[in-house]
Every structure is written in structure tokens, then in C-alpha cells.
Image: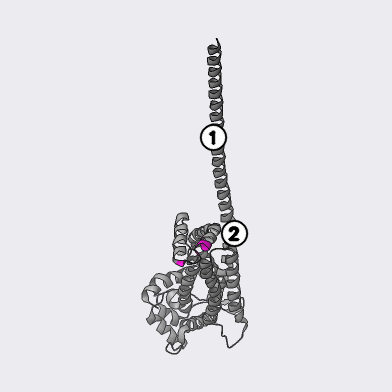
Amino acid sequence: MGEIFGLVIVRPLGLILLGIFKLVGNYGLAVILFALLVKLLCMPLTIKSKKSMLKMSALNAELQQLQKKYANNRVKLNEEMTKLYEKHGVSPTSGCLPQFIPLIIMMGLYYAVQQPLKFMLGFGDDVIGQLANLVGVDMATAGYYGQITIAEKLGQMFTEAGGVWPDAVTAIANGSGELLNIDFSFLGLNLAQTPSISDPQIIWIIPILSGATAFLSSYIMQKKQGTQNSAVNSQMKMMYILMPLMSLYFAFIMPAAIGVYWVFNNVFTCVQEIVLTRLLRGKQEKKESEENARIEAEKEAKRAAHKAAQQEQAQKARELNEARALSAAKKKKKGGK
């Protein structure tokens, strides 16, 4: 992991997670609220994307006409589709970005969960090394989750000391970071544990729920987006297939806390999709109805004006004919005399 990514992304996410944890006092609940916060922060971008996707759904009839017209000319079809998108101010890929932002955040959260002493509590590598020696953890052989093991052992020391930090721990920390007992348990599950595909356990419920909720989220989004052109459909369908598979895979290779984040991110996405679609589609349909009524009123006004002009013209023609007939009659009468 790059230093810039750690400083700009991971550390701030770790501080946010730490702040929520200190507020609620439960690690699992903190992860859930973290997922909710991310969803709320991404809401403006999601709304903008949703509006664009709904506009694209409304263009479906025109897109189908273009596909029939240029069925044998793919280059011309793409050109005309691009012109149509630009005319109505929509982007065929606008729905993808809000789906990938949580992935980026999930990667940052992964490192914050994997290295809680560094990215949540703010300890430097030297202090972490000393704490590892104190609790008997060999960082060279501890693997990716050495800091989690240290945090768990420090928690045991904190509990055994009656809810206070032993002098040996405070002497090493010495104010260089925040000493806090992080309890990774949630509903009987250890969220610091990484589920193993080869070792079925109760914690398998998290990857299963992660994949299932990702599939449900993708299904709802696909239904709510409406039918679009085949090119966009193929892109979106590929994403809808990949997202559940990625969610399931990540939940099996990362600490369970990441799986909990992804489960509730998917749940919040389902709720958000249903609510936004109902609200925005209602507004769009109302706007389209008003626009259609305005256009129809203008057409009716033009028809009425045209009819009035025709009636006026016919009246003038009748008056002119009557005048000519009267003039002819007068001349005839005068000639007879």
C-alpha cells in the first residue's frame, strides 16, 4: 500500500471508524454506521447518476429506432447515439461510478481494519513493534493481520487488569497514539477473523449474506433502471454479475468486518434505489406530463389560429364574391337601360 493512499484515504477512514466506535461502543455497529455514513455522503452523486439513468430509460424508443435504422452500420449508430445522449445531457456510464466508490472506500477500510494500531489509534511502527514484543507477537511471521492479533492481546491485558491499562503498555504508548480497547466481537462473531473457504464455520454467514445482498442490490437496480439500448445493457449486466461475485470473494479473503460493511452497503443501496426511483421517476413523469400538456396546448393554439385564419380568409372571399356579384348586377341593370 502506498504511503499517499495510507495518508489520504486510510488514515481519515480509520479516524472516522474510531470516532463512531467511541460514540457507540460496539465495533460491529460502528462498521454498520460507517457504511451508512458513506452512503449518505455519496447521495448527491447517486441522485445525479439516477436522474441520468432515468433520462436514458425515457430515450429507449428513440434508441431502438436508431438501432433499426443503422443496424448494419455500427459506426454511424454510435455517432447518432452519442448525439442523442449529448442532446438530452445524459451519460451511458453515469450509473457505474456510484457503484465503484464504495469499492475504493472498502479497500481503505480494509487497511484500517487490518492495521488498527496504525490507522485507527495512530501509533508509529516503532511503538507497534514494541507492543508486539510485549504481547509476544512476532511481526515477521504474524502475516497481514499481526496488528489485529496485537490489539486482541492488548484487549485481554486490559480486561485482566480490571479495565485499566498496565504500566508496561502505557510506558510504551507514552501518548504517541490513542490507547483504546477495541473489542472486535459482534453478535457472537469475531469481526477480526477472516472466514476460511476450507473451514466452514458460523462466520460463513457473513460472506453468504454479502453475496446474497449484492445480488439483490444488482437485481433491484437492473429492474429499476428500465430497458436501455443493448450496448449499455451489456455493460450494466456485466457489472451486475461481477458485483455479487466480487462481494462474495472479498468477504472470504478479508476480515469479517469488511463483509459486514459490504452487507449493509448492499442493504442501504437496495433501500436507496427503491426510494430514489420512486421519487425521481414521479418527478420526471410529472415534468414530462406538464411538458406534453404544454406542447399539446401550443399545437391546439396553432390549430385554432390556423382555423380562425381560414375562416377569416373564407369570409373575406365571400364578401369579395358578393361585392363582385353586386357590381356585376349593377352594371347589367345599367346596361339594360
* Rendering coords of residue 171 (x, y %): 41, 80
Vertical relation: 294 (above or below) 20: above
Q: Which of 285 and 213 is in front in this view?
A: 285
Tell me the element at label 2: helix
Q: Name the residue tied to disc 2.
A: 275
The verdict on residue 24 being magenta is: no
Query: Going by the image, does 8 lie left or right of 195?
Result: left
Region in magenta: 66-74
Residue 305: assigned label? 1
* Rendering coords of residue 9 (x, y %): 42, 71
Three-letter code, disc 2: Val
Identify the residue at image location x=58%, y=66%: 222
* Rendering coords of residue 318 (x, y %): 56, 25
* Rendering coords of residue 180 (x, y %): 48, 75
Three-letter code, disc 1: Ala
Vertical relation: 239 (above or below) 160: above
Q: Quadrant of the C terminus?
A: top right
Task: Tell me if residue 162 can be seen.
Answer: no
The reply to whether dot 1 and dot 2 touch (C-beta < 8 Å) is no
Task: Tell me if residue 218 can be seen.
Answer: yes
Location of residue 241 by image quarter: bottom right
Q: Earlier in the sequence, mark 1 or mark 2?
A: 2
> From the viewer's perspective, is the residue at label 1 or at label 2 nearer?
1
Location of residue 323 by image quarter: top right
Tell me the element at label 1: helix
Residue 191: assigned label? none
Crowd rating for badge 1 (residues with CA inside 10 Å; few <14, some 14–19, many 20+):
few
Identify the residue at image location x=44%, y=62%: 79
Q: Which of 53 and 206 is in front in this view?
A: 53
Crowd rating for badge 2 (residues with CA inside 10 Å; few <14, some 14–19, many 20+):
few
Label 1, label 2: how many angstroms apart (C-alpha)? 45 Å
